[in-house]
Image: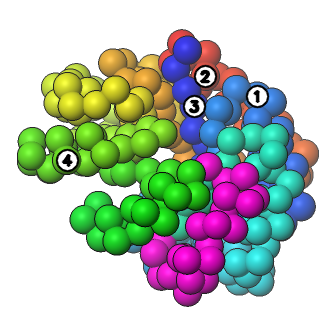
C-alpha cells in the first residue's frame, strides 16, 4: 500500500480548524500529516503555500500554536513538522527535538537546511528518535544521492521537478527513483507538483507521494465554509490515495 503524506499550513484560517482538518485527514487515507510552520519567506514553496503562510502570520500565528495543534493531532495521526531552519533554530534545537518527541511528532522536514548541515544535529535527532527527513533532487550527484539515501530514515523526500509544475507534461522519474533505491531500503516518497491528476504517474515506482498545494488551494477558497473545506480536503485525500494504489 503506497503512502500519502498531506501538507497543511498550521493556523490557517485558525488553530481549531487545523486540528479538525488534521484529524479528519487522518480518517481519510492520509498516512502522515505535514504541519507547515508559517514563515515569512518560504523559498521552497509555491505561490499558494506562500500565500497561506503569510495569511497565517497576519492572523497572529505563533510557534506555541504549532505545539498546541501537535498535542491534539500527533497522538492520533503520524505528524511531521515542515518548516524553515530559522524558525526551529530560534526555539533552540536542543530543547525543540526532545519537545517534538514528547508531543509524539515523528520527524522534521527542513527544506532550506542542506543535508551536510543537518549532520550537526544527527545525534540529537537519533537520541530522541525523531527523524530528520532528507531531500534528494535530480540535480544531486550519484555520490551525494548515495550519502543521503544511506543515512535516510522514515522516508526519503524525492523532489520531482525535472518538468514544469502544472504543464501537464509527462516525465519519466524511473531512472531517478532507481538511482535512490539502489542505495537504500528507506521508502521513497515523491513531492512537488503532485495532485489528483498527476499522483498516479508520479507514484509509479515510488512508495508514496507528498501533496501540499492541492490541499492548500482548498484552504484558501473564501467561498467555502470551514466544514466544506474539510470535506473537500478529505475527498481529495481519498481520491489521491485510491489513485496511487
Residue 230 showing in the rendered view: no
- In this view, the residue in front, 38 or 123, is 123
Marks 1 and 3, how far apart at CA: 10 Å
Mark 2 in CB contact with mark 1 (< 8 angstroms): yes
Mark 2 in CB contact with mark 3 (< 8 angstroms): yes
In the figure, 77 relative to 174: above or below? below
| Residue drawn at x 34%, y 26% as measured from the top left | 185
Residue 121 showing in the rendered view: yes
Asked which colour scheme the image uses, the reply is rainbow
- In this view, the residue in front, 87 or 49, is 87
Residue 98, by quadrant, is bottom right
Which residue corresponds to mark 1? Answer: 28
Indicate which disc, 1 or 3, sits on the residue closer to the N terminus. Answer: 3
Indicate which disc, 4 or 2, sits on the residue closer to the N terminus. Answer: 4
Residue 78, by quadrant, is top right
Which residue corresponds to mark 3? Answer: 4
| Residue drawn at x 70%, y 78% as measured from the top left | 63
Which residue corresponds to mark 2? Answer: 241
- In this view, the residue in front, 102 or 233, is 102
Which residue corresponds to mark 4? Answer: 147
Indicate which disc, 2 or 3, sits on the residue closer to the N terminus. Answer: 3
| The residue stretch that appears in magenta | 84-106
User: Residue lying furthest bottom in this view?
Assistant: 90
Amino acid at each position: 500500500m503506497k503512502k500519502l503524506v498531506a501538507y497543511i499550513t498550521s493556523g490557517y484560517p485558525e488553530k481549531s480548524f487545523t486540528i479538525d482538518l488534521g484529524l479528519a485527514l487522518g480518517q481519510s487515507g492520509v498516512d502522515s500529516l505535514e504541519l507547515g510552520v508559517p514563515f515569512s519567506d518560504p523559498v521552497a514553496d509555491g505561490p499558494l503555500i506562500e500565500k497561506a503562510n503569510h495569511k497565517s502570520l497576519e492572523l497572529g500565528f505563533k510557534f506555541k500554536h504549532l505545539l498546541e495543534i501537535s498535542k491534539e493531532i500527533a497522538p492520533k495521526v503520524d505528524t511531521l513538522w515542515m518548516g524553515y531552519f530559522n524558525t526551529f533554530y530560534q526555539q533552540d534545537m536542543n530543547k525543540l527535538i526532545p519537545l517534538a518527541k514528547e508531543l509524539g511528532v515523528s520527524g522534521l522536514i527542513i527544506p532550506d537546511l542542506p543535508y551536510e548541515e543537518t549532520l550537526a544535529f544527527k545525534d540529537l535527532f537519533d537520541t530522541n528518535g525523531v527523524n530528520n527527513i532528507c531531500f534528494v533532487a535530480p540535480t544531486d550527484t550519484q555520490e551525494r544521492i548515495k550519502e543521503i539515501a544511506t543515512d535516510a530514515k522514515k522516508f526519503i523526500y524525492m523532489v520531482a521537478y525535472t518538468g514544469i509544475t502544472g504543464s501537464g507534461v509527462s516525465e519519466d522519474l524511473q531512472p531517478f527513483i532507481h538511482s535512490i533505491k539502489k542505495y537504500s531500503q528507506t521508502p521513497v516518497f515523491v513531492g512537488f507538483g503532485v495532485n489528483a491528476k498527476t499522483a498516479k504517474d508520479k507514484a509509479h515506482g515510488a512508495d508514496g507521494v507528498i501533496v501540499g498545494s492541492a490541499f492548500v488551494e482548498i484552504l484558501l477558497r473564501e467561498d467555502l465554509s470551514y466544514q466544506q473545506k474539510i470535506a473537500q480536503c478529505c475527498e481529495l485525500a481519498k481520491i489521491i490515495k485510491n489513485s496511487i494504489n
